Image: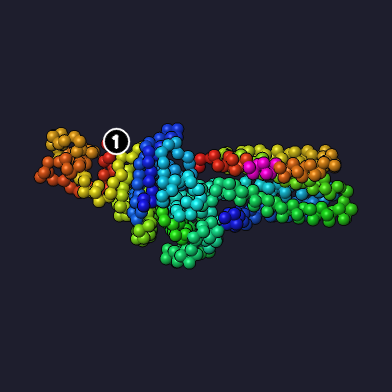
Amino acid sequence: MNALEIRNLSKSYPGFRLENLNLTLPSGCILGLVGENGAGKSTTIKLILDIIRRDGGSITVLGRDNRENSPLLRQEIGVVLDEPGLPNCLNPLQIGRVMAGIFTNWDSGLYEQYLKQLDLPQNKAFGTFSRGMKMKLSIAVALAHHPKLLILDEPTSGLDPVVRDEVVELFIEFTREESHAVLISSHIVSDLEKLCDYIAFLHKGRLMLCEEKDLLLEEYGLVQCSAQALAELDPDAIKGRKTTPYGVQALVRREGIPAGMPVSPVSIEELFIFMAKEAV
Amino acid sequence: MMKALLLKEFYVASRTCRSFLLVIAVFFALSFFGRNSQFFFLYPLTMVGMIPVTLLSYDERDGWDKYSLTLPCTRAQLVSAKYLIGLIFGGVVFLLVELLLLIGLSMGGNFDFLSMSSALLLMGLLGPSILMPFVFKFGSEKGRIAYYFVLALLFAVIAFLIGMGFYEYLNGFSWLVIGAAVLLYLGSWRLSILFYEKREL
């Protein structure tokens, strides 16, 4: 079963439009939603969670339309937002008591285990926590009710590398279970590269591509050559270019490049930057 | 679900609304020692009526307004938690006021208990009933202007009515006034749910 299926999703705001978005997240996988600020990542997440109304299209979460009894559906989803959103004056113990009454599957033992594992004090007010601690607590809350789907909106932004690594580890651990899936949005592409099975690029409200990460890395590469040499290549194979003091660096589809031409591997971050600049 | 949402409101209120307690205690003391001063009770009632609006501002500051929409509760439940916590805190203060009125009456106070109670109930529920739908529709930032405006207006009206000795006019209409106050609060509750269900955050 697919954990998430989005078909022809659209939503308009003054000055912004999300157009015909199609995404599929199979169970057991992690899908990374990459895009610059304002690309439509948070809008997509809000639409999935039925926080805002869609203009068109359909969203199926864990096999059900997301608007069909959405509170019940949200029992099976763990959410972490860029701004954690827990009350500043509550401590983790109080937050746990509140969440125990909200989630039917709340597991107090598991929650306490996460608090210990993530080194979070139980009696300190949430508002006094550092950004990293706040994010860790919000992840503990998202995981402690045994969700099947995790939806994470920029969960690693503003975190130091050590905390980021800890957090990424938790998500990897979560998807060891085959019925679990994660949708994670970020503009820190290096985190997604470590974590994701699938990558989707959003740019100015449009989906540029959505593919398996390993396929992407196999399919695309970088060539370094002169402008003249680049002009001789098949234009359809060139997906982006950048002029450097040493010539031209271009993102290419490997299959469209003559055999023997040196093509170096491309990172997901480079892939996104080249494609976003080309699409401007 | 409602129990959990109320627990959260209670935790936040117990941390953030402590100053309200002090003000309420001061006004109770004033009303106890003052002469002809039953209308001092209006101030604690008005203050406690504003607790749900204050809680909404804290929710926005903390980001709980957005986060709570990702939880498995309905928007109607989120709105209801605010109205119920208002009723709980308001109810406690109102009962205290009633107790003090009875004490005042037994000490030879010169007022009609029922008409005084109905006037106090109406004025206590008026502020939150007017403000809450604004705040649920526009958010507390924009609603803040309405907040101060309504608060100032209420206090001015209260002061004016005290001068007029208006509660004497309510003799005979007390049950009608109580009914109107309750209907006003319930109507405001329903309207807030409608507004919040349509709001995009």
* Image-based side of B147 in relation to A275, left or right: right
Residue that protrudes farthest toward the top in the picture: A14
Q: Is residue A231 visible?
A: yes
Task: Identify the residue shown where x is 48% and y is 67%.
Answer: A109
Task: Identify the residue shown where x is 44% and y is 60%.
Answer: A146
Secondary structure found at label 1 = helix
Up/down of A209 relative to A194, above or below: above
Residue that protrudes farthest toward the left in the picture: A260
Up/down of B193 relative to A194, above or below: above
Which residue is at the front of the view, A8 or B108? A8
Q: Main secondary structure of the magenta part?
A: helix
Image coordinates of residue A173 in percent, x first then y, are 36, 61
Numbered range of the magenta stretch: B184-190
Which residue is at the front of the view, A108 or A134? A108
Task: Identify the residue shown where x is 47% and y is 51%.
Answer: A73
Image coordinates of residue A16 in percent, x first then y, are 41, 35
Q: Which residue is mark 1?
A: A279
Report the chain holding disc 1.
A
Image coordinates of residue A167 in percent, x first then y, are 38, 58
Kind of residue indicated by mark 1: Ala
Please tell me in which quadrant of the rendered image residue A150 appears.
bottom left
Task: Identify the residue shown where x is 83% and y is 48%.
Answer: B114
Which residue is at the front of the view, B152 or A186? A186
Mark 1 nearby-residue class (10 Å; few <14, some 14–19, many ≥20):
few
Residue B38 lies within the magenta run: no
Up/down of B133 relative to B82, above or below: above
Q: Is residue A38 visible?
A: no
**Quadrant where the image shows the C terminus of chain A:** top left
